[in-house]
Every structure is written in C-alpha cells, then in structure tokens.
Amino acid sequence: MDHLKNILEALIFISVEPLTLDKMKEVLDDVSEEDILQALFRLGTEMEESPRAIRLVQTGGGWVFMTKSAFDAPVRKLLQIERRKKLSPAALEALSAVAYHQPVTQTDIMAIRGVDSTHSLHTLLENKLIKISGRKDAPGRPLLYKTTEKFLAYFGLNSLEDLPREEELKKILEEGNT
Amino acid sequence: MARREYPNEEGPLEIPCPEGPAYPNEEGPLGEAPGTASLRPEEDGYRIKLDIFEGPLDLLLFLIKKKKIEIQNIPLALITREYLDYLHEREHINLDREAEFLLMAALLIYIKSQILLPREQPIEPDIDPRKERPDRTGDYERVRVVSAVLRDKEEEQSTIWRRTALNAPLPEQDLDLIEVSLFDLAESFFTMMKRKQAAPQKILKTKEISVTDKTKEIVLALQTKGFLDFLEYLDAQETLEEALVAFFCLLELIMARRVRAIQEQLFNTIKVWLRKEPAGEDA
C-alpha cells in the first residue's frame, strides 16, 4: 500500500496540471479506484500533518501539490511577484453570474446585474476564467458562456459542486440581513 | 436598468386619466378630455392617442400586461410612426424619458410579435409574454453573495502556490506548452490585422492566391523550419488578402490535425508545429 502511495506522490509531483483520477487509473491499470483514493487520502493527511511546506490539494478536477500558506512570502519573493492581481468587483460579479447560470448569454448576465457587462466578460475571457461554449438557439443566436477548469483552479474548487448551494446562499443572505 | 413599478391589481390604481392633447402640434384639448389644457407635452411626455386608448405609453403597457386591453387591437406601427414624427418636430428631447419610451415600445412590439406568431399549442400561462418579466433582483442578491464567497476563496488561494507558477523559459519544445483555443488564434489574428491595416499599402496588381497553394507553402515551410511563429508568419505576408488566406489555411490544417498550434505560457505568441505522422497523441 505504501508503494502505491509513493507512486502517486511521484505522479503528482511530475504533473504540472492537477492530475486526474482517470490519468492515475491509466497509469495504474490494475489498481482499483477505491485503493487509489484511499492512498491519496493517506498521502494528503500525512503531508498535512508533517512539518513540511508542501500539501496535497484536490482542485480543478485533480490532485496537485501546493505550498502551504505560511510560505507565501518567500515563494512570492522567488517568483518576483509583489501581490497577486485580483479580479475587479465587476468581473467577479459577472463571473459569479456565469458560474450559477451557465451556459448563459451576455444579455442574461446584464439582466441579472442590471449593468452592461461587456468589459467584464472580455476580461474573464482573456484570463480564461470563462469560455464560449456555443450559441443559444434563440433569436440572434447569442453566444453562450461557461466557466473553465482554470476557474475552478483559480478559486481552489474541485468542481462546480463546491460552489455554495441554494440553501447555503440563503443562510448567508439572512445572516447578512440581520 | 430601472425597473418600473406597477401598482398591484388589488391596490388603489393611481393612473393618470387618458386625457389632453396627444401631439404638440394639435390645437387645444379634445372634446372628451375635460380641463387638461394645462398639461403641456414638455412636462407630461408623449401621449398616445388611438380610438381605443389615449394616454401615456406606460399605462398602455400596464393595461396590456393586466390583459385589460388586447394587444392585437393596438396598431404599433402607427404609434411608432407618429412617435417618430413627434421626435422630429422636437427641438430638445429628454433622453431619459425617450429611452424609457423606447424600452416600453420595444417590449410592446415583442409582446405583440409573440402573440401574433402562429403556434401549435396555445401559450402556456408561464411563458405568456404579457407576463411581467421575472424580477431578477433575487438573482442579483445571490450573485453578490457568491461574489463575496469567491472573493474569500481568491484571498485564500492567493497565499498558496503550485508549480505552474514557475515558468522558466523552456528548452524542450513540447513540455509545458498548451494547445491554444480558437479564441487565442482569433485574438492574435486581429492584432495582426490591425497592424496590417495601419501599414501603408500600395497595391499595383492583385495576386491570385489559392488555399491549396498556400497550404502547400505552409506545410513546406513547416517541414524545412520545423515550426512557424503564427503572428510572424501572417505578418510577413505581402497583402492583407494573402494573410487572410494564410490564416484560413492554418485553421484548416489545425482542424485536419496536420499541425498543432501551441502557445508557450509565458509568451503570447502562438507557434505552429507539424504533427508527427501518423497523427497520434504525442503529448
């Protein structure tokens, strides 16, 4: 079992993009999915508990090693990044609208936000947080937008299921109102 | 977009009576409208005057939504024409008010077109175009909350790093390259187009360029050079037309999977490689 864990560690280490379960199964063709998941879990807890600077993170539909947040400053110094650019409030709103209503047209996003969102959508497309997924079968055949894998990775989400659900949103809204 | 509030059906209806001169060029009040001469069009906005309805447009829209008036009986073309005449005669217009009028008129036209369209089944109540559009403030509230949640996650993510962040220039050709989307290609193309358009051009005679010839040329160039810089190559074309043809050839080649278009993550230029034959997965 430890051997399997070590193999997985090697595979994830060498992968730049999050390594998907499918890819792992492809490499380890005689190992069951259950065993892989179990080994991943053990690897994750082990790394988390160790004083080492790397942790295993499930994000963007796969697994990837990331630095722990305590090491933010030195890492940024190495990368010569002052601070990570953040999305503008407008872009974030447009992105939220896409995330919850996808696939969605620009008109719909405009109707939800009540303001023109052309620029925000353009920014999001440029940053590859959303993509064009086709055209809507409606007058004018408007373009449809949806979120990308990069969107998930950017926010550390494993899948769209990780976004807060209806009930959770309601709760947050109520808390905010009282 | 400001949403117009309409009074509830049950509530007291405070709606202006249809009255007063409908057009600024009309003299005095009409017989049936009592004592309204003081209402000047400037203050009151444009009014509609039809046999079946007289008054402001928002009232008409309201009554249609409440199904008090059948939209089939409202000649929208006539309203539009008279409204345009009215606009032409005005020296000053109040943009806010006219924009609102346009919005309402567009809504009316939409409703009428939907009602007039032949349908196989009768309109279901919940898709009745006369129905008030669903209020999207709820959606917006939700979007605001989600934005806040995502902002927290963004904050959290901004302190942890993964290896992709380290993008040293790559010696190996295939490692760490991403295949580009159509969006990237198009963007590069438009950058190039803009540059080309700006450059002075002297065209003496037009050259006939066929897609087949250009494709051959590109493949040959790829075979000798190994790869092409997408932008550079298009840029080097003599004319805009030739660049266009080259662009389409490249698209064709990518679609036929004879070449791969790849973008190095650090740089924004797109490179095109010939696929090793037989065309298989070589990533």
Image (spheres, grey):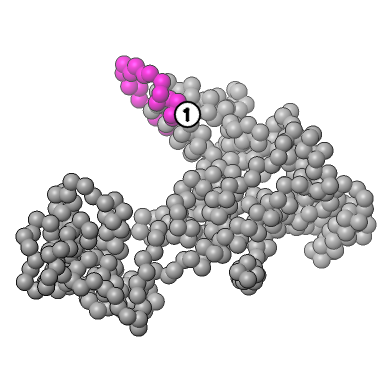
B27 sits left or right of B227 in the view: left
Reply above or below: A106 against A175. above
> Compared to B91, does B194 lie above or below?
above
**Residue A170 coordinates in the image, percent (x, y):** 61, 71
Residue A31 vs residue A71, the one in the foreground: A71
Query: Going 35% across and 75% down the picture, which residue do you hit?
Result: B7
Residue B102: x and y in percent read: 28, 57
Q: Position of residue B171 (x, y in %)?
A: 74, 28
> Residue at the location (65% across, 36% down)?
B265
B197 drawn magenta: yes
Determine whether the residue tagged by mark 1 lies in a helix, strand or loop: helix
Q: Output the chain of dot 1.
A: B
Q: Quadrant of residue B99?
A: bottom left
Which residue is depicted at the point 51% across and 34% down? Answer: B188
Residue nearest the viewer, comparing B272 with B110: B110
Q: Which residue is mark 1?
A: B192
Magenta range:
B192-212
Give the side of residue B230 with respect to residue B203, left or right: right
User: Relative to the observer, which residue lies in front, B257 or A81?
Assistant: A81
Residue shown at 54% from the left, 44% from the top:
A123
- Amino acid beneath label 1: Met
